[in-house]
Amino acid sequence: MENGIDSAFHKIRKSATLPCTTVIMGKDTKKSCEVLFTVPFHDLDPMQMVWHGNYFKYFEIARSALFARSGVDLFKYFKETNCLFPIVKTSTKHVASLEYLDEFKCIATVIEAEYKIVVDFQVRLLRNDQLCAKGRTEQVAVKYPEKEILFEIPKDIREALGF
């Protein structure tokens, strides 16, 4: 294990301390992070393409790296505040198939973090930057154990994510 990520099938730049190559602050000041991967055999379906459900795994790894780079640890936050951040909506658009040993990057970008945390994803081949998939996740803040949905993301999380 390297930084909690199975390095046998995640290609991570050696200079990265986390599985995140960069934090990009674009002109809209949206935080973004990319993670490099190599498609392992066990991610393939019978047609020798990445099984569609594995894209959510790539999204989760990229989102986790983005949050870590932003100083956001949602598990620690829950232990300290009893505030959870469940994913309430996901979407994925598959454009081109990833195949065995393809090297690719998954880019996670925070789009919104005021009332819900919205993260957009792009999966792109490294060899030609071709878009293979794009997706989105939405998370809300929930007070536990009451299971009460909060109407805004707590201020410290918002600020860490750039909002």
Image (cartoon, grey):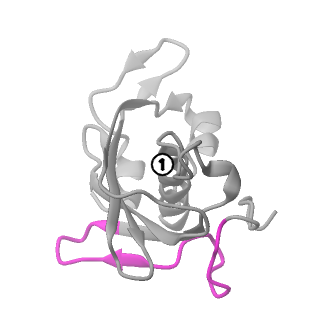
| Direction front: furthest residue | 47
Query: Residue shown at 60%/63% (left/top)?
Result: 100
Q: Is residue 119 visible?
A: no
Q: Which residue is mark 1?
A: 55
The quadrant of the rendering that contains the N terminus is: bottom right
**Depth order, front residue of 122/160:** 122
| Direction top: furthest residue | 146
Q: Give residue 150's position: percent from left, percent from top.
A: 34, 26
Q: Give residue 151's position: percent from left, percent from top.
A: 27, 28
Q: Give residue 34's position: percent from left, percent from top.
A: 46, 70
Q: Is residue 127 above or below residue 30?
A: below
**Depth order, front residue of 111/50:** 50
Quadrant of res 138: top left
Q: In the rendered view, does 112 fall on the left or right side of 77?
A: left
Query: Residue shown at 52%/54% (left/top)?
Result: 58
The quadrant of the rendering that contains the C terminus is: bottom left
Q: Give residue 80's position: percent from left, percent from top.
A: 62, 37
> How would you classify the magenta stretch by its main secondary structure?
loop
Query: Residue shown at 34%/51% (left/top)?
Result: 158
How many marks on residues? 1
| Direction left: furthest residue | 28
Magenta highlight range:
10-31
Please tell me whether residue 28 belongs to the stretch shown in magenta. yes
Please tell me whether residue 120 belongs to the stretch shown in magenta. no
**Label 1 residue SS:** helix
| Direction right: furthest residue | 1
Q: In the rendered view, does 5 fall on the left or right side of 71?
A: right
Name the amino acid, label 1.
Answer: Tyr
Q: Is residue 160 visible?
A: yes
**Depth order, front residue of 120/160:** 120
